[in-house]
Image (cartoon, rainbow, N blue to C red):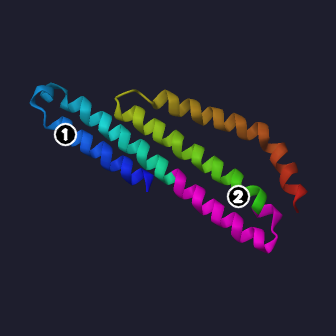
Amino acid sequence: KKPMYLLAIVSGFYLSLAQINALANYVLAITRIYQALIIVIFAYAASKVISSVISWGIKKRAATDSKVAVTFLPLTGKVLSIFIYVIALIAVLDQLDIKVTALVASLGVASLAVALALQDTLANFSQAFT
């Protein structure tokens, strides 16, 4: 509901700015900003959808008394939301003509370091539920 309102407001604002003749020199910049805002709105919508699905899954699993699912579903939802926002941030930066190759490489190295650091912790955590 809210992302659709935001989409309508941003689209209307963009269309009205694109029609002003005094801003003809800035149409490219206005279009890039509009596209960046659309990316952010879609990321917000995707995050809300994931949050709703995770909440539904928790309610469904709570009825079956599955502690593993109830424990891991919120964590999974937060990780997916962060992943969506990081991808959206990279897309927005790319849309605004900011070089993102170094950022993507840094994120890859950082995620590998975090995965290696958490390997034993996650193994112990998963063994506690089996």
Q: Is residue 49 above or below residue 107?
A: below
Alpha carbon distance from label 2 to label 1:
43 Å
Q: Are marks 2 and 1 in contact (CB under 8 Å)?
A: no
User: Whole-percent x and y of residue 86?
Assistant: 53, 39
Q: Which residue is mark 2?
A: 73
Q: Name the residue at 59% across, 62% down.
A: 53
Q: Amino acid at mark 1?
A: Ser
- Give 59 or 115, whichever is nearer the viewer: 59
Kindly report which numbered mark, 2 or 1, lies closer to the viewer in this rendering: 1
- Give 103 or 3, whichever is nearer the viewer: 3
Q: Amino acid at mark 2?
A: Leu
Q: Name the residue at 11% across, 26% down.
A: 22
Secondary structure type for disc 2: helix
User: Whole-percent x and y of residue 126?
Assistant: 83, 55
**Residues drawn in magenta:** 47-69
Judged left or right of residue 55, residue 18 is left
Figure quadrant of the N terminus: bottom left
Q: Main secondary structure of the magenta part?
A: helix
Mark 1 Cα shell of 10 Å, populated few (<14), some (14-19), many (≥20): few
Q: Which residue is mark 1?
A: 16
Q: Is residue 100 above or below residue 81?
A: above
Mark 2 Cα shell of 10 Å, populated few (<14), some (14-19), many (≥20): some
Q: Name the residue at 19% across, 27% down.
A: 26
Q: Is residue 48 above or below residue 65?
A: above
